[in-house]
Structures are given as structure tokens and as C-alpha cells.
Image: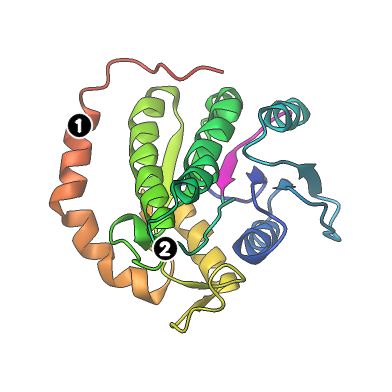
């Protein structure tokens, strides 16, 4: 499903820095009519098309308040995330990552499904290559992103009947504060943001937005896992996701 960002309304979580801020700027550059920039902390964007929202994706009350402020929505980008090193010794590390990277994505998506169904819009989940190959220095993060990828695939099948497209973004390391201390090649956030929205406009179900991830793109799209996902999606009879 092809979709132009021009004249569309976009909502982003985790919008105040890093990839989130780059996505705000890229959506504006592509002519978005309105960008809801959601973050836990206030931010300043000198563009009248931007509406700032205070939103912690783990706070049910803030999610409800944000949903009440948004009158229409075409594209929702679940970008808010957490990544903290751990060594598998502390269960709370998993709980913290799952609260944001999995349940936050699900809860925010559920809140905005009615608006997205009305516009036949799109959900864009920022996942990670860590979802398909664990990063041993970040095991809790990797587990949470694997769960996020599975969630994205289920949402794709369950929301299709309501005309909502669902995209998984599978980036490698991005040059942001989250991984700045890791001594590995990183792609600038602006480049990744440009590739993400380009992928959405082209209707790519999985978006590989950087040189590292692009090496996997062809094999993923033609691979057994993708074929099995499509086969399993055929079992869906009705959409149980409601506001």
C-alpha cells in the first residue's frame, strides 16, 4: 500500500531526540500537514505544524490524554524505546525493556487504532536487527525487540481488515545517544529517518533503513520466515483489536 506523507497527520513517540527528532524533521520536510511530537519531556520545534504532546508510553493516563487531543491521524510511529546493557542477572532489566519496547508500543497503538482505521492509515514500529539476532551486550533489549517484531506481525494481520497497514523498521546501529558509547559503525539518524519514511511511502512491510540492515533485506523478503508469516496471517478471521 503506497502512501505519501504529504498533507498527512503523523504522530511520533520518543520525538524529542535522536531518531525521533530526525523523524519529526523528515515528516515536515515531506510536507506533513500536522506532526504530533510526543515525548516524556517538553521539546521545542520552530514549526507551526508541530503539536507537542507529553507522553510516557508506560503511563495509561497520559496515553488516554494524548488520544483525546488528536482529532485525526494517518501515520503513527512507535519510536519510544529504551536500551540499557545488562548481563542476564537482573530480571528487572527485562521488565523495564518490555514495559517500554513491547507494552508501550501495544498500548499506544490500541489507543489510536480507531483514528487510523478511519483514515486507512499506518502503524510504523521501530524494531531493530537485534530482534532477529540478539546483541549479547543487550540481552533484555534484544528480547524486547524480538517481542516487538512478533507484535508487529500480529498487528499487521489483525488490522488488515480495518484498512490499517503495519510496518516493521529493522535498523542496525544508529548514531544516537542510545548506542553512542558502543565502538561500532553507526548510521546518522537523519539518513535513517529519510529511509524509514521513504519505505513507508513505497509500502515496504519491512524497512531496512541503513547499510547494515540492507544486507539482509532481499533474503528476509524472500525467506521462509516471511512466507510463514503470510501463511499464518491467513488464519485471521476477524479483528479483535478495539479501543
Q: How far across and how far down the image is residue 100, in percent?
A: 55, 44
Q: Which residue is mark 1?
A: 232
Apparent side of residue 34 relative to residue 180 in the rendered image (left or right): right
Q: Is residue 102 left or right of residue 82?
A: left
Colouring style: rainbow
Mark 1 residue element: helix
Using the image, determine if residue 5 lies above or below residue 21.
Answer: above
Q: Bounds of the magenta span?
A: 71-78
Residue at 28% x, 61% y is 133
Q: Quadrant of residue 119?
A: top right
Q: Does 146 lie within the magenta span?
A: no
Residue beneath disc 2: 138
Q: Confirm or deny contact between disc 1 and disc 2 (CB under 8 A).
A: no
Q: Quadrant of the N terminus?
A: top left
Residue found 62% across the figure and 37% down from its top: 58
Give above or below for 240 relative to 31.
Answer: above
Q: Is residue 37 left or right of residue 12?
A: right
Disc 2 crowd, CA 10 A, few/some/many (<14, 14-19, 20+)? some
Discs 1/2, front? 2
Q: Nearer the viewer, residue 233 or 184?
A: 184
As measured in the structure, the alpha-carbon distance from the residue carrying label 1 to the one carrying label 2 is 30 Å
Q: Earlier in the sequence, mark 1 or mark 2?
A: 2
| Total numbered labels placed on residues in the image | 2
Q: Position of residue 76 (x, y in %)?
A: 58, 41
Front residue (pair 84, 205): 84
| Residue occupying image coordinates x 41% and y 69% | 172
The answer, for residue 138, to whether it is visible in the render is yes
Rendering coords of residue 38 (x, y %): 71, 46
Q: Nearer the viewer, residue 172 or 98?
A: 98
SS for tag 2?
A: loop
Amino acid at each position: 500500500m503506497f502512501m505519501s506523507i504529504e498533507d498527512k497527520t503523523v504522530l511520533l513517540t520518543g520525538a524529542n531526540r535522536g531518531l525521533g527528532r530526525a523523524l519529526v524533521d523528515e515528516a515536515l520536510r515531506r510536507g506533513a500537514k500536522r506532526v504530533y511530537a510526543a515525548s516524556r519531556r517538553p521539546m521545542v520545534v520552530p514549526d507551526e505544524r508541530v503539536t507537542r504532546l507529553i507522553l510516557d508510553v508506560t503511563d495509561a493516563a497520559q496515553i488516554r490524554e494524548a488520544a483525546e487531543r488528536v482529532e485525526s491521524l494517518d501515520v503513527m510511529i512507535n519510536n519510544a524505546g529504551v536500551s540499557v546493557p545488562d548481563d542476564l542477572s537482573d530480571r528487572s532489566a527485562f521488565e523495564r525493556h518490555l514495559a517500554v519496547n513491547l507494552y508501550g508500543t501495544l498500548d499506544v497503538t490500541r489507543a489510536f487504532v480507531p483514528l487510523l482505521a478511519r483514515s486507512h492509515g499506518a502503524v510504523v514500529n521501530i524494531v531493530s536487527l537485534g530482534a532477529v539476532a540478539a546483541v549479547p551486550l543487550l540481552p533484555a533489549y534484544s528480547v524486547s525487540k524480538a517481542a516487538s517484531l512478533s507484535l508487529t506481525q500480529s498487528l499487521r494481520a489483525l488490522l488488515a481488515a480495518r484498512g490499517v497497514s503495519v510496518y516493521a523498521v529493522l535498523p542496525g546501529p544508529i548514531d544516537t545517544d542510545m548506542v553512542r558509547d558502543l565502538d561500532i559503525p553507526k548510521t546518522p539518524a537523519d539518513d535513517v529517518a529519510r529511509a524509514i519514511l521513504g519505505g513507508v511511502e513505497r509500502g515496504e512491510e519491512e524497512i531496512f533503513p541503513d547499510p547494515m540492515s540492507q544486507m539482509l533485506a532481499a533474503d528476509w523478503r524472500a525467506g521462509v520466515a516471511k512466507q510463514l508469516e503470510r501463511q499464518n496471517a491467513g488464519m485471521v478471521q476477524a479483528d479483535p483489536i478495539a479501543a
